Image (cartoon, rainbow, N blue to C red):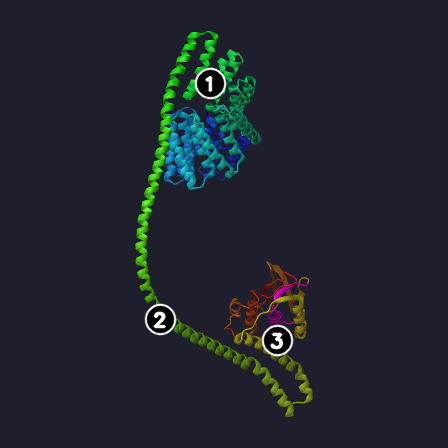
Amino acid sequence: MVVLGFCLFSGPLLGQTSKKDSMELRLRRLESTNRFNPKDSTHINLLLGLARVYRFHDNERLYDVAQKALEYSSEINYNYGTIKGLEAVANYYYDKGDRKKSMPLFKEALQLSKDVEDVQSEISILNTLAQNYSFEGNYAEALNLNLKGIDLAKQINNLKMLSVLNENIAGLYADQKDFKNALMFYDTVQKINRKVGNEIIDAETQSNMASLYRDAKDYKNAIFNINRSINTFEKYKIYDWLAYAYEVKGDIYLDQKKYKWALYWYDQSNMLFKDEIEDNRIKIQLMNGMAKVYYGLEKDSLSLVHAKKGLAISQKIKSLQGQIDCSETLYKIYKKKGENEEALAYLETFKTLSDSLFMDKNKQSLSLLETKLEYQQEKKELIEANQAALAKQRNYIYFSVIVLLILSIITFVVRRSEKIQKKLNRELKEKSLAVTQREAQLHEINKTNTKLFSIIGHDLRGPIGGLQSILKMFTDGDISTKELVSYIPKLKSDVDNISFTLNNLLSWGMNQLNGVITKPKRVSLSTLVVNNIQLLSEIANNKSVKIINQLPDNPRIWADNHQIDIVIRNLLSNAIKFTPENGLITVGAEEKAGMWQISVRDTGVGMTQEMQESIFKDSSNITTYGTNNEKGTGLGLSLCKEMVHKNNGEIWVESTPRKGTTFYFTVPKALKRYQNAS
């Protein structure tokens, strides 16, 4: 019996030919790119993938791509590529029957995987080595490697490899005709397969179990399992496993002397070997099986051809079991033909090899049991040593807990006094901080008061004093009513300026002294702009300055209505002030990532870079004069900055002297019809 495991086919290969074509296409595309680097890990991994696909299909191509991957990996110290490259080249030599070259490579790959702590690769190589030792008849070493692999697979919870390794052990027992233990391990494998939930892995197990049931002469279970596996392999076009399953089904019918059915399934398997598969180990069984079928059908010449093919392959790859089986068949054929000399030669070969294998198998049976017992004993000793270490460690822990308890009591007393001291220090610090904060608040209030009085002194006292002077002159009779009437436009302008300044002053003062609460809501930007244009239209008309509203259709913002109203009014007022007669002011807005960006552009006098950098500073108290000598407080832009920031926006200026200025500010866009204030 030959049990196929993970090492033989590197796992299920869905649609083998299409996968090979797909990987070759990916490789050609990668190699044709301008930035292609043959030593890149992506290229190396593709080569390794192709090596896995080529195995049992095109072994010479396997060798070529594996050597390239190994060479590139060594040059860039790519450990994973080196491990898998060594494993692929080792498989190539092993499939050729050259153990002297394959085994050192396997062992080198295994050691490297241990050195770099690549547990997945270590499990894979242990499995491969175990399969190879099993094929050679060294069941004790195979069992030992499988058990080590199982322990590692449990550590990283690799269910797929747990299934494969347990199935390998089942195969070892099956080869010893110990069907009870073999079935016990297969039961474990099937439980793991149900957890994995992979239909293909389950089919691989069923095909191996079918071979076991055939050896046990349980043909009903054998046919049941092999039919289920064949259905799955045909469904997914897994030709390597399908060839094996067809061969097993032929064996089942051969055992029952149903030669025509056996020949049918052998032919199915043989066609796959001709077209798709290059696996000499399974081909030996197939050739000998077909030889037995033709012998049973009394087609001795065909039987002889196939038996000799099987024997030649067995001798090529040094398969002892294959040489025994094929020699036995050749002995029967020559004996039937009456060629006694040839028959005797094959009988002696069969007898010599069988006796040798029988003795080895008896030894291996004992070794298998001894290995298992030794392994269990080693585990038991390790567990006992671990328990003793744990007990010793517990004693240390108990002693440490007592010492720790004493230290805790001492620490508690010390910490308690420290805590009291820290509490007193914290209270003192908090009081000191409160005094410092209060001093800072008083400083800010004094600063605000200073600025208020400065503005009142510079910007309100002048216009009010002028108004008082004119009224006094009129009441004293120094000017006539007609002259008083001529002063009315100037008086109105002064009063408007005083009113505007007072509004800004009150808003700014409340913001500085008490803090203004921002209450955002859905606001029509168009309404704010139109209202302010109307409010300032008389001042603009007096200078023949035209204000153009270029807002989009009814934009909605999410902001405090009063605060944004102040911003727009100040920016428009500034624009009128610094725009000469017959100038132009444009108000626009555009969407910018969830915000409305509003612009107020004028064709006025502009400003220098130095002025642009200072106008928004809180400390700025610059009084400037417009094109008609209009006087400002220097307060408006500072107020605008505060109001915009309170509404989660930004404000900035772009200006060129003698060409004009554009003020920009952003406010959030109202996204919903109804939105709660945040």
**Residue 76 — which label?**
none
Tell me which numbered mark, 2 or 1, is placed earlier along the sequence: 1
Magenta run includes residue 70: no
- SS label for mark 1: helix
Q: Please determine whether, in this image, residue 311 is positioned above or below residue 530.
A: above
Q: Which residue is mark 1?
A: 310
Name the residue at 34% across, 66% down.
415
Where is residue 343? Give x, y as percent: 43, 10
Which one is in front, 193 or 516? 193
Where is residue 8? Give x, y as percent: 46, 29
- SS label for mark 3: loop
Which of label 2 and label 3 is nearer to you?
2
How far apart marks 2 and 3 lie (CA) works out to: 69 Å
Q: Dividing the picture into quarters, in which one does residue 624 lie?
A: bottom right
Q: What's the residue type where badge 1 is placed? A: Gly
**Residue 421 — which label?**
2
- Describe residue 538's horizontal placement relative to residue 357 as left or right: right
Name the residue at 37% across, 37% down.
112
**Labels 2 & 1 near each other (Cβ < 8 A):** no
Q: What's the residue type where badge 2 is placed? A: Gln
Name the residue at 36% across, 27% down.
366
Q: Which residue is mark 3?
A: 628
* Label 3: few (<14), some (14–19) or many (≥20) C-alpha neighbours in 10 Å: few
Q: What's the residue type where badge 3 is placed? A: Asn
Tell me which numbered mark, 3 or 1, is placed earlier along the sequence: 1
Q: Please determine whether, in this image, residue 248 is positioned above or below residue 427.
A: above
